[in-house]
Amino acid sequence: MSAAGIGKRMKFSEDQSRARDAIVTRLRAAGVDLASGELGPAPREGPAAALAVLGKAGSGKTALLVDIAGALAEAGLEPVGGDYEPRRARGRRSFAVLAPTNKAASVLRARKVPATTLHRILYIPVYDPEFEKIAKWLTTTGAPRPAVEGLDDAMLDRIKNFYDMHDSVPGAMAIAGLSGSDFITGWTRREEPLDVALVDEASMLDERQFEDLTEIFSTLILFGDPAQLAPVGQSGSMVFEKLPEASKPMLSRIHRQSADNPILDLAHALRDGIGFEDFEAEVEAAALKDGRIVIAPRADPDLMARAPMLVWRNATRLRLIQAFRTAHGAPETALLPGEPLICDGIELPLKHRKKRIDLEARGLIKGAQAIYLGPGKRAGFARLHIVGAEAPTVGAAAIIKIEAPGRDEPIIASAARMGAAFVHGAATTIHKAQGSQWPAVQVFAPDLYAAAGSGRNEAGIPLWRRLAYVAVTRAEERLIWVRRYAMARPARALGVADLG
């Protein structure tokens, strides 16, 4: 399909057309003429000049990104994927569709866009030497007992005892409250120059990621929502705010879902000056008029089995997970088939890069949602249904942690030597839910009330409003506003029959 054909098949609004024209102009200046299909050499004169297409939920950013990605492929640019090797693309123009998280990338892949995370393209992890000392001590006969800041002798003894029983380094580290991300002290940037980048969920980029993107890519097109949550530790600011106004075309018309959808109406009701009580009153009024908005007196564990409850505080997350498991009669130290999980990363040494790529290609990526099917044929293995994967049933080495309130150490329900790490998926924080959507979403209102009472702001905007905006817009079809710390009785037992 030609770029012109894509444009004719997609009916653009006036603001989308202006934004697309700005992108086409920027690409033409970089030697990519979408109208004629002619390609020139990639510019290499300093950092890329970024263009940011901005708009709130439903304004058509993703539709525009999909259109531009298709036009670039039709023009002959080679898509850069997660298994990218720079030598293969030498001498050819290329483009990458990137997102800050695997969740956001998977949303684009569901629309047939070859998206991957910017970390897989840009960075190589650097592991903490203290972790390497512990791993060597556990796995090598005669290795000296390490002295590690923050881990006393009693904790090292517990780590060693767990390893002697289960032969799992990641599991032993989890006993100390550490996960794979804690083993990584930083990231070494790839040095090979790249070409055109389309970056979704740009509100999630931090300053360093943005700087690295501009230095590695010759052309950078961002797509972002200025109303979302900014990266933690960045004072509520987003990287595109510093760009010239001419480089920030704004989308304002609502496209995704119908214009009268109450979910989007609520998202856009989070206007300047509105307080939590007034917003909650609008939620109640919407629920009286439309069945797609529900006021619930308690959490629904049946929904939590397939879509996590969205919360602000980690303590709330742990309380709800424990209540969910108690409601289903789950044993303390083991999982029931049908329990939800969230992948917390692939805990493999760097030398096992090919194995990591294979697991990620099968959908086992950080942030991926999975359903536990049962134990695998070997110790430490689990059978899993990876939500959204093309071949969802996977058997994999798994390190599964079950956390609970007041418990310093998680229970390790599965302890492989190395592989995919998981936490329970019945609840998750709103920050970690960015980039994801589910047909029906439960939002835990008491946490938003607590955020409102905290008086915290991000870039002059009350934090609770940003949290509410992100939480509400995770719902595709139905939004459930949960009012109290209470768990309903399950209407059905946990199971996997619905997974087909």
Image (cartoon, grey):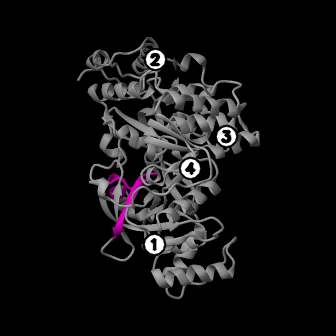
Q: Does the magenta stretch include residue 338?
A: no
Mark 2–mark 4 Cα distance, whole angstroms, equals 44 Å
Residue type at mark 2 is Ala
Task: Point out which mark residue 345 bears.
Answer: none
Viewer-nearest of discs 1 and 4: 4
Viewer-nearest of discs 1 and 3: 1
Mark 3–mark 4 Cα distance, whole angstroms, equals 35 Å
Mark 1–mark 4 Cα distance, whole angstroms, equals 26 Å
Mark 2–mark 1 Cα distance, whole angstroms, equals 52 Å
Counting residues from the N terminus, which is met first, the one under dot 2 or under dot 1? 2
Q: Is there CB contact under 8 Å for labels 1 and 4?
A: no
Measured along the vertical axis of the image, is residue 464 above or below residue 26? below
- The residue where tag 4 is placed is 298
Residue 57 visible? no
Residue type at mark 3 is Gln
In the displayed structure image, the side of residue 231 where residue 94 appears, left or right: left
Span colored in magenta = 358-375
Instruction: Tell me which corner region of the image, top left, top right, bottom left or bottom right, holds residue 318.
Output: bottom right
Q: Nearer the viewer, residue 355 or 213?
A: 355
- The residue where tag 3 is placed is 234
Secondary element at tag 1: loop
Task: Point out which mark residue 334 bears.
Answer: 1
